[in-house]
Image (cartoon, rainbow, N blue to C red):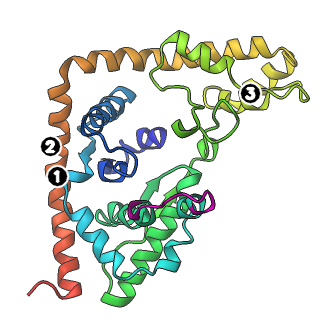
Amino acid sequence: MIRQLLGQQDEFEVYALIVDYHAMKSVKNPEEMRQNTINIVLDYLALGLDPKKVTFFKQSDVSEHTELCWIFDTITTMPYLMRAHAFKDAAAKNKEIDVGTFNYPMLMAADILLYDADIVPVGADQKQHIEIARDTAEKFNRIFGETFKIPEAMILKDVAVVPGTDGRKMSKSYNNTIPLFAEYDEIKKAVMSIVTDSREGIPKNVYEIHKLFRSESELKKLYSEKKGKYQELKQLLIEDIEKFIAPMREMRKNLEKDIPGALAILKEGAKKAKAIASKKMDEVREKIGVKV
């Protein structure tokens, strides 16, 4: 997602939303929530997103997101939302499912449609949410008249799903991540833990992660020359990740010295986002008949 935003900030009007209300599904500690927000802002800035080109803001600073979510709730059926992957996965595991998990796609649809988004950069695992946003926009337009743009998902083929150290999708919940601003020793520990398949001669999981840092033309030659030498290949991956991460890691450490400055960027972005969302919601209220 970040890689796509970096590529778009010079060409498009980009909105980088911190979805703190979405995060409430899993974060119930206020201090943790506040620190997470700060961390995300620092991450975005350290990765190279330019606040002069990108609008950074918190979901909770623009109340129109939750208002529009409720309106979408009233035109969405339960059977439709029960087809969502996250809900089906939770149900299959016999989890006690909260309303936030069930309703997550509607809030995400509001996040997207409020700003008349043309494209939404996501990983392959989020494709269904974009489809739900599209369906919701089309349904609202049919009922109340043309109001919302129909967004397109933008999924870079090479990073559609980032693999974790165990071969599954990289996710904190799976404890299989390589932290984005990790120190060298942390990178080494994570890479050395990557699960390898001795049958191939070329460790698939190592290769899949390595593709994020080198071209496949380079890697095919390299992995062919070092076939079966898993330790060496992992060490090369460690060095490539360190080379990629080190400059960003130092930038983030510098940004940490001015937290108020980073939060000021959020506040400024919220003003811009609020103005756009407010205008859109005036149109929505007019269409549904609550504006008299």
Residue under label 2, please give it.
Answer: 268
Q: Residue at x 29, y 77 (%)?
A: 71
Q: Callout 2: 10 Å neighbours few (<14), some, many (20+)?
A: some
Q: Amino acid at mark 2?
A: Glu
Q: Which numbered marker is on residue 178?
A: none
Picture residue at 52% right of the left edge, 36% below the top:
172
Please say if the residues under marks 1 and 2 sit with CB atoms less than 8 Å apart.
yes
Q: Which residue is mark 1?
A: 272
| Element at label 3 | loop
Classify 278 as above or below 204: below
Q: Which type of secondary structure does the marked residue at label 1 adopt?
A: helix
Tell me if residue 95 comes above or below residue 47 in the rendering: below
Q: Is residue 258 above or below residue 270?
A: above
Side (left or right) of 14 relative to 246: left
Q: Say which amino acid is labelled 3.
A: Val
Which percent across, then down, holds residue 218?
Answer: 73, 24
Q: Residue at x 47, y 78 (%)?
A: 78
Q: Is residue 268 magenta?
A: no
**Mark pair 2, 3: CA separation:** 44 Å
Q: Position of residue 254 (x, y in %)?
A: 28, 15
Q: Which residues are magenta?
A: 91-100
Sequence-earlier tag: 2 or 3 = 3
